[in-house]
Image (cartoon, rainbow, N blue to C red):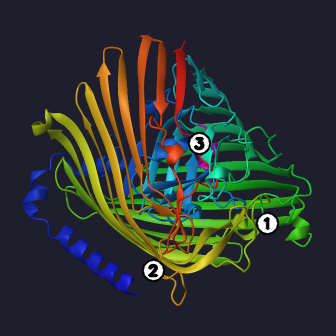
């Protein structure tokens, strides 16, 4: 209750600051005719700050071209966003935004919602990067065009739409048996532009690590091991066609992944590797969209069909499987979803801009294998229907259109329950260099089928019924861009924001032991923090950086967890990248820091902090050929990254349950025809 009172006071303070800005400031920056100002503020995407009335970060993968970065690797650079990984580079990876659970983060690719009811969250490591033009990360305020239950934030991935005929081929190899190939072709077709992509990647994952056998005091049991049963094979295809009105797209992703056992006691040198488990996933998305306008009214509709098959096979017959003592040998999940969405925008007069969104989806989950007998009582099919509606109005509070108020109301229904929430934002452009933003609102999210029924592999159904999550959020931010003369005339942009979130009935992921996990409601959680990001750009040099301080606390009263840190939320994290351009190439150095964070809700086990350094270069052999090479984790920090007893429990640190790869090399050759 105290936080709600603090939020109201902070919101009132924000309003007073914004509304009492000196008139001379806004009058001094009026340069455009009044009838054009509103449209320019809303539609101008030449600067990322105009994409949303809330805080937004845009990543352009071209800056990392050839470095063989996955989507989780790129998202590590976003302030306030924490990528939670289970294992190494190709392990299951999900996002937490401002301390949210991963289920609260919505992920879109070309307008298609990737979140399924049959998945707790989107596995970011399974989304290919070969055709991506930009990645937008929205935090706090969620624009009306995104209709999902995005309590935490939205990751919006937009693929390329080139209209010039060209073919790009990228071939790469790396440490631990990594091979990667991508072919991208684009051109004109039938009055529109066409893009086709095929990508293939394989990874053995047999890196070395120090195995203390979970007996830190017994040195005789320690040995250098090689990670086994840790391979991954990925294949993806994308076809997209669009003209001024229509867009049609089809995508397919297949991922075959081995699920290695926990490391202690395993992978002994000289002994055959015990048979492990596998999880094979195939997903396809088909979409058709139409963009139209009638006078000032612009509206779009989109129809989407999605199918997914996940198959878990445990090859350790007669032994405890990777989900504990249930001896599950085989589970298969089939998901189909059909969705329709409509969004529209309409300027009303000179000071209002109205946006609407309406969405419907029907999803079916089919379960086969051992799980239906162990936990589902023989029931092998589940259906879910979802409706959502958003309305948002951007209003100009001054004649210049530099002071905007954006209220939004959202309604969501899942099966037989529904919730209504709201949000509001204030944006004031103080000058061409300065902008301040503030948002406040409520949110709600229903438990999905994955949280209720598990995944048939290592996540078990909950021990009781899950309730809807609800909460409030508040943030205030300032953005600046311009030229910094004392720093050699560098062009710079930077942002600083503070945020507070309160969630009740938070659905949290818990590793109950190294072999399996469940989802549970905790009564409440409170998160507050500060985010910072920026970039300095000279003719030859460029420096980008981000940092986050976050305090994520369990506020469940009358429990032993009250006042404890939420797991997988480090208090401090930071990244920095320095690039030096020369002639036809460039070199870079990159640094990442992840602070200590807890592995469990009771603060008994903590992951130690980690510092990672990366180095690399790229060189244009010709106008159409580029070579990129580098080394990740230069100092092999993963070799020393460990867990330690926490919460007053004594004892030495020990190895991770699932070790991650350390120092690795990569080499990529890219050719354009």
Horizontal side of residue 304 vs 14, given as left or right:
right
Instruction: Using the numbered discs, state the Cα–Cα distance from disc 1 to disc 2 in whole angstroms.
Output: 38 Å
Q: Looking at the image, can residue 351 be seen?
A: no
Q: Is mark 3 on a helix, strand or loop?
A: loop
Question: According to the image, label 3 marks what residue?
Answer: 89
| In the depicted structure, whether residue 157 falls above or below residue 558 | above
Horizontal side of residue 309 vs 482, given as left or right:
right
Position of residue 337 measured from the top left corner of the image (x, y, whole percent): 74, 55
Question: According to the image, label 1 marks what residue?
Answer: 383
Query: Which range of residues does the magenta coloring cover?
Result: 122-128
Horizontal side of residue 672 vs 429, given as left or right:
right
Q: What element carries label 1?
A: strand
- Residue 292 in magenta? no
Position of residue 88 measured from the top left corner of the image (x, y, whole percent): 60, 45
| In the depicted structure, whether residue 436 falls above or below residue 248 | below
Q: In which quarter of the image is the C terminus?
A: top right
Please tell me the numbered disc located at residue 563.
2
Q: Looking at the image, can residue 325 be seen?
A: yes
Tell me whether circle 1 and circle 3 mark residues in contact (CB < 8 Å). no
The residue at 19%/59% (across/down) is 399
Instruction: Using the numbered discs, state the Cα–Cα distance from disc 2 to disc 3 in whole angstroms.
Output: 32 Å
Mark nearest the camera among 1 and 3 is: 3
Position of residue 555 measured from the top left corner of the image (x, y, whole percent): 48, 81
Q: What element carries label 2?
A: loop
157 or 62, nearer to the observer: 62
The residue at 35%/14% (across/down) is 584
| In the depicted structure, whether residue 595 falls above or below residue 527 | above
Mark nearest the camera among 1 and 2 is: 2
Q: Residue furthest front?
A: 220
């Amino acid at each position: 209750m105290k936080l709600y009172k603090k939020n109201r006071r902070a919101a009132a303070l924000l309003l007073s600051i914004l509304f009492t800005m000196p008139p001379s400031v806004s009058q001094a920056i009026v340069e455009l005719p009044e009838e054009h100002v509103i449209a320019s503020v809303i539609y101008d995407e030449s600067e990322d700050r105009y994409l949303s009335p809330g805080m937004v970060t845009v990543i352009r993968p071209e800056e990392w071209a050839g470095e063989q970065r996955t989507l989780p690797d790129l998202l590590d650079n976003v302030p306030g966003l924490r990528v939670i990984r289970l294992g190494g580079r190709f392990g299951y990876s999900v996002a937490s935004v401002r301390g949210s659970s991963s289920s609260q983060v919505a992920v879109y690719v070309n307008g298609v919602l990737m979140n399924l009811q049959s998945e707790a969250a989107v596995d970011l490591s399974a989304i290919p990067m070969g055709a991506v033009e930009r990645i937008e990360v929205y935090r706090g305020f969620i624009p009306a065009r995104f209709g999902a239950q995005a309590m935490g934030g939205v990751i919006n991935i937009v693929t390329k739409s080139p209209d010039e005929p060209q073919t790009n081929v990228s071939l790469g190899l790396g440490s631990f048996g990594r091979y990667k190939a991508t072919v991208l072709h684009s051109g004109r077709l039938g009055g529109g532009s066409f893009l086709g992509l095929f990508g293939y990647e394989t990874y053995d994952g047999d890196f070395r690590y120090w195995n203390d056998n979970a007996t830190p005091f017994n040195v005789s049991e320690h040995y250098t091991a090689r990670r086994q049963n840790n391979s991954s094979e990925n294949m993806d295809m994308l076809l997209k066609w669009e003209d001024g009105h229509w867009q049609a797209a089809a995508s397919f992703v297949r991922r075959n992944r081995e699920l290695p056992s926990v490391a202690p006691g395993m992978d002994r040198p000289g002994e055959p590797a015990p048979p492990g488990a596998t999880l094979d996933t195939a997903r396809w998305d088909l979409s058709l969209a139409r963009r139209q306008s009638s006078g000032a009214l612009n509206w779009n509709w989109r129809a989407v069909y999605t199918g997914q098959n996940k198959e878990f096979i445990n090859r350790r017959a007669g032994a405890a499987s990777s989900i504990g003592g249930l001896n599950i040998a085989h589970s298969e999940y089939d998901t189909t979803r059909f969705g329709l969405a409509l969004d529209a925008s309409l300027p009303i007069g000179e000071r209002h801009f109205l946006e609407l969104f309406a969405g419907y989806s029907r999803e079916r989950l089919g379960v086969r294998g051992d799980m239906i007998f162990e936990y589902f009582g023989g029931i092998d099919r589940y259906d879910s229907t979802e409706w959502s509606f958003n309305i948002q109005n951007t209003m100009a509070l001054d004649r210049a259109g530099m002071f905007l108020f954006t209220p939004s109301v959202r309604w969501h229904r899942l099966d037989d329950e529904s919730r209504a929430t709201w949000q509001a934002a204030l944006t004031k452009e103080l000058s061409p260099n300065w902008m301040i933003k503030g948002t406040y609102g409520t949110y709600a999210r229903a438990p999905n089928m994955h949280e209720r029924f598990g995944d048939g592999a290592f996540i078990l159904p909950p021990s009781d019924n899950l309730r809807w999550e609800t909460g409030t959020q508040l943030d205030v931010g300032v953005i600046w861009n311009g030229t910094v003369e004392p720093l050699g005339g560098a062009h710079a942009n930077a942002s600083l924001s503070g945020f507070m979130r309160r969630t009740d009935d938070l659905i949290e992921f818990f590793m109950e032991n190294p072999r399996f996990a469940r989802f549970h409601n905790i009564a409440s959680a409170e998160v507050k923090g500060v985010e910072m990001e920026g970039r300095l750009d000279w003719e030859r040099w460029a420096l980008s950086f981000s940092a986050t301080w976050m305090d994520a606390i369990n506020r469940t009263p009358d429990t032993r967890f009250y006042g404890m840190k939420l797991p997988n939320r480090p208090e401090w994290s930071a990244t920095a990248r320095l690039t030096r351009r020369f002639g036809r190439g460039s070199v870079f150095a990159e640094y990442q820091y992840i602070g200590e964070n807890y592995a469990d809700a009771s603060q008994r086990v903590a992951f130690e902090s980690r510092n990672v350094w990366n180095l690399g270069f790229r060189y244009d052999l010709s106008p159409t050929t580029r070579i990129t090479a580098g080394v990740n984790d230069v100092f092999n920090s993963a070799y020393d990254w460990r867990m330690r007893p926490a919460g007053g429990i004594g004892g030495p640190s020990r190895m991770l349950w699932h070790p991650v790869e350390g120092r690795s090399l990569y080499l990529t050759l890219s050719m354009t025809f």
